[in-house]
Image (tube, rainbow, N blue to C red):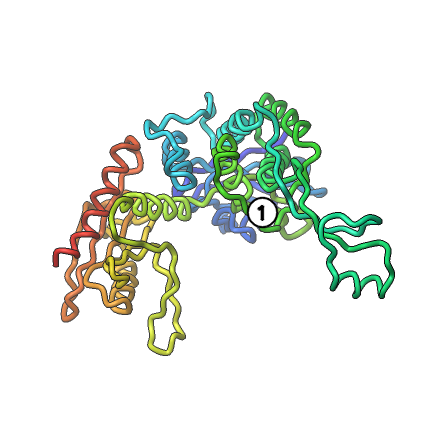
Amino acid sequence: MSATVELVEHAPATGHVLPDAVGRALAASRVVDASPDPYTPGRWLLRAGSKVGAVSVDGPDLASPVTVRITPKVPITRLFFLLGYSLDPRGVRRDGQVDVAEHRDLLPALAHAVERQIDRALWQGLLQGYRETEESALVVRGRIRETDQIRRRFGAALPVEVTYDEFTTDIAENRILRSAVERLLRLPGVPREVRRRLLHHRLRLADVTPIVRGQVLPAWHPSRLNARYQHALHLARAVLSDASPEHAPGGLRIDGYLLNMNKLFEDFVTVALRESLRGTDLGCRLQASHHLDEAAAIRMKPDLVLYRPDGTPLAVADAKYKAEKRAGYPDADLYQMLAYCTALGLPEGHLVYAKGNEPHAAHRVRNAGVVIHQHALDLDQTPTALLADIASVSRHMRACLSV
């Protein structure tokens, strides 16, 4: 029987009796903050940060696996709205209702949601499309790759190096779905019934080549033909892009699913701000590279820069998931935003936090004429109210146009 450690995102450290190898593996992998208890041998102090989900630590020297489950502070349905909106803002349901059945933990809920979307995607059969194929053949098919023919065959007539377009199910969309199924089947904590349905989907996708972990996901482009696949593809990308390690020191293996709430909040805020600007003549860029100094030696990448119609910067925004501390907002964030505004020549900057201890605040920097706004978003509210708060931040950013 495996031992289970229950933690809560950003909660105070708690003590747990663990094998030293497991404690060291958790510390080295940065799944959680882990340190030995100086007063009690065999006891480790564990504190979860911004990663939520579940991982299992196992190895030949352990009597049984150890599962670490990290519960998010945000309710699962709200978390899935943030995830769905950041992946597909025009496809997510605005009422916040997500098909996660009765599951209250992240991994079972995610596995259920992905399986349901894949089932809907494949209900009418597998999508087919053209894929460019290169091979050595005894007959000419498609186009001869003359350079490869000379380099590999040294003048021999056969076999022929050819390239042709093949109409097949082994296309990017199906490969992504197959890979998400394979990933979920390897994870501990997927409910038995969901696992059974995933095995059925793997049979349906048996002729599709899965993506090797670590490889870049193949590109696909939304179209009328793959419309029924799109929701499933967005969720599959979340499954394949998680933050969990696979190996740990001492021959141990860590497997599971971890979602970085810092990254999720940043993606949601920037995508929602971008969507709020649709229909205007303003432009915005996410994670655009700029430089702080004239020699272009110090690079900076603000989360979002808003541009006037003539292409000059108008305002800048940065998303900060955790701002909770007794003294209020962190001062370091203000210094970073001031550097952004100074380098970009902007009169205003905006810091957007998950709700902490402070309401909206505005600071005018002495001798600089720069105003830095700090906004707080309450994530535990309805999607409609949350998007309304984002629209308010967007209006603040656009107010510079009248200045």
| Horizontal arrangement in the rendering, residue 172 relative to residue 356 (left or right) | right
- 10 Å neighbourhood of mark 1: few (<14), some, or many (≥20)? few
Where residue 380 appears, x then y in whole percent? 30, 34
The quarter of the image holding the C terminus is: bottom left
Residue for badge 1 = 218
Is 331 in front, or is 388? 388
Rendering quarter of residue 64: top right
Q: Can residue 107 be seen?
A: no
Q: Can residue 380 be seen?
A: yes
Where residue 241 appears, x then y in whole percent? 53, 45
Task: Give the amino acid at mark 1.
Answer: Pro
| Horizontal arrangement in the rendering, residue 310 relative to residue 86 (left or right) | left
Which residue is at 17% across, 60% downward?
A: 371
Is 13 in front, or is 368? 368
The quarter of the image holding the N terminus is: top right
Rendering quarter of residue 155: bottom right
Secondary element type, mark 1: loop
Which residue is at 32% across, 51% downward?
A: 319
Where residue 154 appears, x then y in whole percent? 85, 65
Which residue is at 15% across, 61% downward?
A: 364
Rendering quarter of residue 332: bottom left
| Horizontal arrangement in the rendering, residue 84 relative to residue 306 (left or right) | right
